[in-house]
Image (cartoon, rainbow, N blue to C red):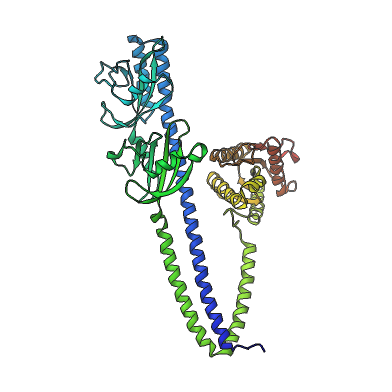
Amino acid sequence: MTKRYSITFWATVFVGAVCLSLIVVDVWRSINARSGQLQEMERLSSNVARAMAQQADDTIKAADTALADIVERLETEGKAPLRLDRVHRQMQAQVANLPQLVGLFVYDEQGRWIVNSREVSGEQTFNNADREYFIYHSAHAERGPHVGDPVISRSSGKWIMPVSRRIDKPDGSFGGVALATLDIDYFRRFYQSFDIGRRGAVALIANSGTLMLRQPYDGNRVGMRMNDTPLFREYIGRSGDARVGSANFASSNDGEMRLNSFRPLEHYPLFVTAALSREEMLERWRRDTFMRSVGVVLLAALMGYFGKRLVGQIKLREQAETELRKARDALESVNRTLERQAMQDGLTGLANRRQFDVTLGNEFSRAMRHETTLAFIMIDVDYFKQYNDVYGHSAGDEVLRAVSKLIRALTPKRPGDLTARYGGEEIGILLPNTDIDGAHAVAERIRRAIEELRMPHSGSSYGFVSISAGVATIAPKRGMHLAPVLVEAADKALYAAKSAGRNRVCLAAQDAPAGTIVG
């Protein structure tokens, strides 16, 4: 015979299970929140490293281009006084145009100045034959640029990063060095613009292990060797594309545990790192977790107390449960209604299709009344199905979020403008009072920006995530046009963009209905 437990027993089991569930759910949410916070910070540090690498590469390349021109002139035209005077004026112009440059200098094979970018070139004041870059070029016949260790300039007293090229004599022997000195403070000012928290750090490091610059700045650490640090060992132990990555380890400078994202420069033997403090990253998570946990514990205690009282009031409890079920059902019904009426797409944060349809009708009517044009851009992520197949739907969702965020940032913010998720990976942009050239410019700007993100996509023929877009405009006439005509024209233009190879913007055809679709 099966034992029948009393209602008191089942009530106790129920209250205990609910309290335990609250605690388990809270722990699960806390773990997920921590993981999400760390992932978000990893993306942030990776983006900072990408920006730093691009800035450093562009900065050095501008100086190197100036050096290459100077070397070519000297080797081609010689070092006669008139020729040097011409080079001197050229140097002054380049230093004036490039804020990162402290100066440009040319040394002969003995290390003596023969021309520089100062106001008065004059005779040389210093001999730089003992500098690392001079010794390097005198011993190496390579003609490419050389990025030397940071030094304090003898002419300006500033910390500089030397970028140099070898000058050859007509017979191919060593004829001197052309030098560009980059201002370390130029990099500092750029790095100070990043919000990396109170305990974060960014750095520019040579592949040889020499620290070029670290922010927070410490002049005593510039030029120090970092070969024995965990960061350098992690970076140098990788090769190729694997050198773009992230890792957690304690700083050799202050012992702080940080998430380090590192990335090499594209053209020069240096790499950058953006490091965010794990403790600082998790401070808000700990605070929120503590407050929520206190609330959950108090709630569990209250439920236990009232559960005990309800055991003695069976009838009242049953009545309350019945009323609670009715209220819950009514609330769920209301929530479902509100969800159906919601005007925002949950994945991308953009307007959803319902809001788009409503806005399209309103703007179409307004354009008809005011006799203005209405533009529409239909955007589609190229090879999105292949992206999901290769990287998974979760990664596909992240791509949609990233693309949507960028589109939202690059579209106008005028009243009536609307960016909406039209369906799947399709995003529509409605632009009232906009002609075909204006809409095309917006679409092309978005396409280029997404292309420049270079989000990897092995399933695409381009190797990165790209978009195609169709653009159409209409000047609505009463009794002649319907709003869907505009969408259909943009959709056809999008199909044409995809048929033409994707990663492009196409305009609607000239022979659109009634001559009102402009392309």
Q: Quadrant of the N terminus?
A: bottom right
**Residue found at x 45% / y 47%:** 247
**Residue found at x 51% / y 60%:** 32
**Above or below, comparing residue 377 to residue 161 in the picture:** below
**Can you see residue 74?**
yes
**Residue found at x 69% / y 46%:** 487
**Above or below, comparing residue 43 to residue 293 in the picture:** above
Question: Which of 52/226 is in front?
Answer: 226
Find residue 16 and report its horizontal and vertical position in percent. 52, 79
Question: Which of 10/444 is in front?
Answer: 10
Q: Quadrant of the C terminus?
A: top right
Find residue 123 and report its horizontal and vertical position in percent. 25, 15
Find residue 335 and report its horizontal and vertical position in percent. 61, 68
Residue 29 appears left or right of 132: right
* Quadrant of residue 497 within the rendered picture: top right
**Can you see residue 51?**
no
**Above or below, comparing residue 70 to residue 33 in the picture:** above
Residue 178 appears left or right of 351: left
Question: Which of 175/120 is in front?
Answer: 175
